[in-house]
Amino acid sequence: MTTEKSQVLAQAIENASASAKRAVQYRFTPVWDAKREVVTMYRLALRQQPDDAVEPGKVPSVRDAIDTFLRVLRQAAATLKESLEAEERFLLVLPMKFEVLGSATGRTEAATALRNMAEEIRPYLVVHVVDVPPGVPQSRMSDVLSGIKPFCKAVLADAPLGMQSFAHYQNAGLNALGLVVSAQIPVGAMQDEILKLCVAAKRLGVLTFLTELGSRELAAFARESGISLLSGPLFGEREKPQAMSRLSWEELRQSAS
């Protein structure tokens, strides 16, 4: 082989390797049912690659958010199809930015994609609406959720930290209300947020959940406060979801030690 051909081959291999590294990867984070002490649900999201970093000064567009959701939804459909064929049962939680539902294009594309999923998959799909802006009117919240609720098992939504009123979540069609845990907020302040969430959820008649939970101390507080579902770095990641598995509080404490 000539030197020139060797260089061309080496460049092709390098390009293929770089392309593989940029390939979409997904992460599955277990969601722990604190009351039953089992894992039957996984959060599915894109694993951010170095090339995915947002350029300085560039704000991700609504189109970006729509495309990301559709990408993850396709992976969810493939994962659930495979699990059903293997007779394994678990729920998949898909994050969807509120701005996707806030735009007419996003609502239409999301609803169409969900509607086109196989009917046997829908009972295992949960949509988690994230980045909900403060002060969204109750009527708007209800309207944007109504387009996706018929095509999945449940709809969850985040509540912004620091909320004083949760009235706009009333009768919006939610199954659970939750918080994104922030490591930037002191533990005591985060505990106050959790207590407010529990009170609000009880009034609304919905379940509660926390995401991005990495503190064993905060997990213990959340569990004692009655939070239903917990997820985050504390629970690690899985390359592939599994059928229902038991995880006792004692096992969780020891694994997080």
Image (spheres, rainbow, N blue to C red):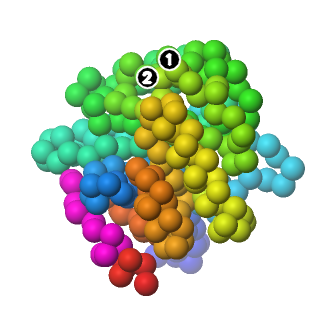
- Most extreme residue toward the right, as rendered? 57
> Mark 2: which amino acid?
Lys
> Mark 1: which amino acid?
Ser
The quadrant of the picture occupied by the C terminus is bottom left
User: Mark 2–mark 1 contact, CB under 8 Å?
Assistant: yes
Identify the mark at residue 167; answer none if there is no mark: none
Residue at position x 71%, y 42% in the image: 163
Circle 1 sits on which residue?
146
Residue 28 versus residue 204: which sits nearer the camera? 204
- Most extreme residue toward the bottom, as rendered? 257
Residue at position x 37%, y 28% in the image: 152
Residue at position x 48%, y 57% in the image: 225
Describe the element under mark 2 as helix, strand or loop: helix
Circle 2 sits on which residue?
149
Q: What stretch is highlighted in magenta?
A: 243-252
- Indicate left or right for 243 with 250 as reference: left
The image shows residue 33, relative to residue 93, as above or below, that is: below
Image spot of residue 178 (x, y percent): 54, 45
- Indicate left or right for 111 with 104 as reference: left
Image spot of residue 166 (x, y percent): 64, 33
Q: How far apart are marks 2 and 1 (CA)?
A: 5 Å
Residue 116 versus residue 236: which sits nearer the camera? 236
